[in-house]
Amino acid sequence: MWPVAILLIAVVEFYWLSFCFTLWAWVCAIADLLQGKFIRASIWFSLGCGMLFWWMGTDIDFDRWLHGSYVIVGLGALATFVRFYNRHRRAAQAVPPFEPAPFEPAPVTLNININIDPPAQTAVLFTMISWHWHQHCAELSALGEYPVRPSTTRTYTPGVFAARKE
């Protein structure tokens, strides 16, 4: 009994999905047409018509449907071209062909301040990074993995920034 159930479920599911795709194609065709996406709308329209021909059992074969779809999609492409051509033509009409140049250009004032001294935060950050780097190098040197002894002009002591001279 279960092989018959599997067969019936598969057949019903095939027809259900075909029906859902038919509705989906028509809804997408109408939505894309209203949005002005004519090429997409024509493709969805062709698919929807093909599904309707299949449902109604008409005498239209696949090749005839395909050639008709070519014509419909071509008309959609032509409608898209006309839409963009009209948009371009309206934009070109809105701008006068020759706009007179300004009589005298306005002077340009540049106010550039160059500060060569680094801010205090940069010095503090450099000091902290330097202290951590030299602590790391000292640990590696103690382990024998870092043969070069680090040298620095500044060290970091918690709470106190001081310059050290060697």
Image: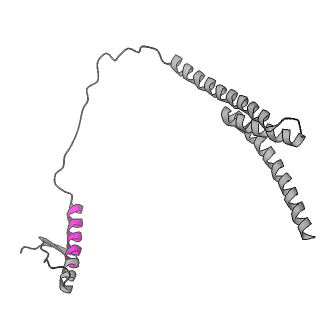
In the image, 95 versus 51, the foreground residue is 51
- Left or right: 32, with 152 as reference point: right
- Left or right: 2, with 99 as reference point: right
Is 127 magenta? The answer is yes
In the image, 40 versus 111, the foreground residue is 40
- Left or right: 165, with 146 as reference point: left
In the image, 50 versus 48, the foreground residue is 50
Image point (75%, 35%), residue name: 66
Image point (79%, 39%), residue name: 48
* Quadrant housing the N terminus: bottom right
Is 116 magenta? The answer is no
What secondary structure is the stretch in magenta mostly built from?
Answer: helix
| Span highlighted in magenta in the image | 122-135
In the image, 30 versus 123, the foreground residue is 30
Image mark count: 0
Image point (85%, 52%), residue name: 15
* Quadrant housing the C terminus: bottom left
Could you tell me residue 145's position as x and y percent?
Answer: 20, 81
Q: Is residue 36 visible?
A: no
Q: Classify residue 75 by image quadrant.
A: top right
Q: Which residue reaches farthest right?
A: 1
Q: Is residue 66 visible?
A: yes
Could you tell me residue 87's position as x and y percent?
Answer: 58, 24
Q: Classify residue 154 by image quadrant.
A: bottom left
